[in-house]
Image (cartoon, grey):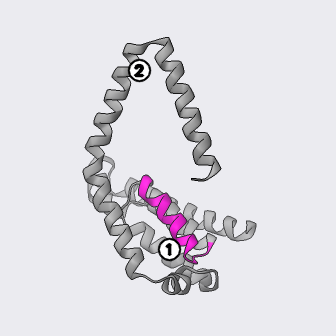
Amino acid sequence: MDMSTIILYGIALILLVISVVKDRGKTKKAIKKGWMAFIKIVPVLIPLFLIVGIVLSIVTPQTIKTVLGEESGILGVLTGMLVGSIAFMPPFVTFPLGAELLDNGAGYPQVAAFVTTLMAVGLVYWAAEVKFFGQKAVALRNGLAFLASGIVAIVVWGVL
């Protein structure tokens, strides 16, 4: 466990103790509510973690370096943006996946492009969004999000 994890657990524990001291009943109710939310999300988490694990075991670090590594340049950024725009993952899976990609040789601009499009561009949701917002609004939102993701990748590239 790294130091930031220990600090976060420590802060959570201190806040829990403060909450218990202030109002034991509300704290118990909140813990129960949190536990129920966790139980509801576990069936979604397990398959996602399994898929990410399988993909990372099949896709070698060398493949990641080739496709999304620093040497992949603008093509790697565009690949990251394309895959991120099409794929669907919740943030609690996306960010650890981004860290894994970095650990396996992917470049920072490429991962930034992938993660930002994954979070901002929603081609998977296109049909559902059109029903609520209309074709033009959805196209504009996705186009601007794609453009913003490209800008983020360029900024990361410039900084690192």
> Mark 2 sits on what residue?
27
Measured from the top left, where is residue 89 in percent x and y?
38, 60
The amino acid type, in three-letter code, at marker 1 is: Gly
Residue at 52% x, 65% y: name it.
98
Q: Position of residue 43 (x, y in %)?
A: 25, 52
Q: Is residue 138 left or right of residue 155?
A: left
x 32%, y 29%: residue:
33
Q: Tell me which segment is drawn in magenta.
A: 92-107
128 horizontally vs 4: left or right: left
Secondary structure beneath dot 1 equals helix
Q: Are marks 1 and 2 in contact (CB under 8 Å)?
A: no
Residue 86 showing in the rendered view: yes
Q: Sequence order check: which comes first, mark 1 or mark 2?
A: 2
What is the x, y in percent for residue 67?
51, 84
Residue depicted at 32% across the width and 54% down the height: 45
Query: Which secondary structure lies at badge 2?
Result: helix
| Image-quadrant location for residue 29 | top left
Provide the residue designation for mark 1.
80
